[in-house]
Image (cartoon, rainbow, N blue to C red):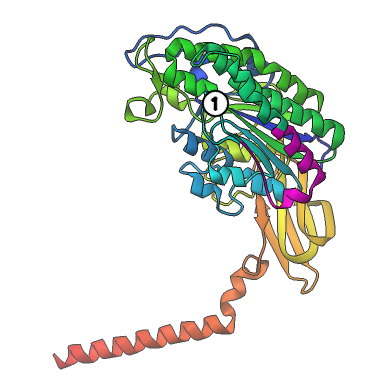
Amino acid sequence: MVNPIPTPSGMVLVIVDGLGAPYIYAEHTPYSLDGKSLQVPYFHNLSILGTTGAKISEIRAPQTYTEAGHSVLVTGNSQALSDTVSVPMSTIYDVAHDYGYLAFGIMEKGDSSSICAEHDVIVHDASNSMNNPGLVVESSITASSDIVCKDIKRIMEQQALKLPIQLQESKQTSQERYNIYDKWALETASQVVDYMAEEAPEQKYILTVNVGAVDAAGHYRKYDGYIGTIQSLDRDIIPLYQTCMENNIAFIFTADHGMGFTTSDSKGGHQSDTYSGMGETQMIPFVVHAPDVPTQVLREEYNQQDIASTILSILNLPNGLRNSDGIQMPLKEHITLGVHGPSPGAVELWTEGKLITQASNDENYVFIGLDREKNYTVKFITDDTSEIFQKEIEPASEQLVVFNKDTSDSDSNQYWKPRYIIGALIIILINVVGLVYIRKILKDD
């Protein structure tokens, strides 16, 4: 801890399937494909979330369908699909697991097999149906012996039994059924957060909550049903948000993609060419409430692939995402730097020619609370060979620095090693022989 800054005890990531930012952001006006503005009511609670937290005014999804949206959100790769999620160290969950976090999921949509496999415990709707939901609770092999994971699995199993009963109390295709479907996911999430606060307050975690009824309403209940489902979400999101704030849990509100409508009385879409180019389909909300993240509105344009590295920043975890092509949104005044050495050794962190901190007897280090505006130099000295590795860190560069035998200060001298000298001599000899041969041919001619 270079400077003392607060760190959240965990994170709840709420992904609202199909929620376009223009429908809930006051600064934007949604339009249908026929060019007419769409009327939206005032969403009281969602507006408060946006004005009391950190909000990105314009952030766009590069791919406007569910599998891709969730994959981009957790990998930071703009072209990600479910197979990208399976690559080791490619997701926020991989990085978090490396630092002792658990990953829990409540997924009504976006539950590809690769997404499910990233979680220690997850409940998801395998049938993707609000008429006959097929809720399945799964846990990883490592979670089977963990007491906390066992208890979370029990909570999810109990909640999974309740949803079909709750849905039977409403008529199929009714607005009430859509509202119940989303409310169940949010209430289950609140139970998980309450349990972790009471029974495992020291265990950090990421809880991903996908609510799926907004997207379904856009497809099947036309524009009025879409707005009606958002109104229900506006009412039901607050208990989960308050539970997070009371227990030092970072709260993130976003979406996988938006929704477009041809007219104010039509069904919506988002994946086909008809809709995929619309701002209403591409633009998603992104609101953050977390320690060390001040209330602000960023009006620069960002992209969905920028969210993954920003999530790690909020948790004070180094950005070790393997395939990310996103950038980190500057929501915080401080940054985190991770250092991984080739073997146990000592590390030093310098700025402005001064040694500000050092540590030893490990190969993995994390520096928290670095000034975003400063340059830093990190040095790593191995215990076994006293080999020195060094890298300059530019301002606002939040990253995981990996040192290995090819990144030491002696990099510039490595080409004097015997194998490189021999290789170079062979290449020179071949070129000389070739030139002599060409000259002989030309002389003969």
The residues colored magenta run 136-157
Residue position marked by numbered label 1 in the rendering: 212
In the foreground, 1 or 166: 166
> Which quarter of the picture shows residue 181?
top right
In the foreground, 191 or 373: 191
As drawn, is 368 to the left or to the right of 27?
Answer: right
Q: Is residue 373 visible?
A: no
As drawn, is 165 to the left or to the right of 345?
Answer: left
| Label 1 residue SS | loop
Q: Main secondary structure of the magenta part?
A: helix
Where 354 falls versus 24 (above or below)? below
Residue 287 percent coordinates (x, y): 63, 24
Which quadrant does the C terminus fall into? bottom left
Magenta highlight on residue 290: no
Where 108 falls versus 21 (above or below)? below
Q: Which residue occupies 18% across, 88% down? A: 442
Q: Tag 1: residue type?
A: Gly
Considering every residue shown, the one lying at the far left of the view is 445
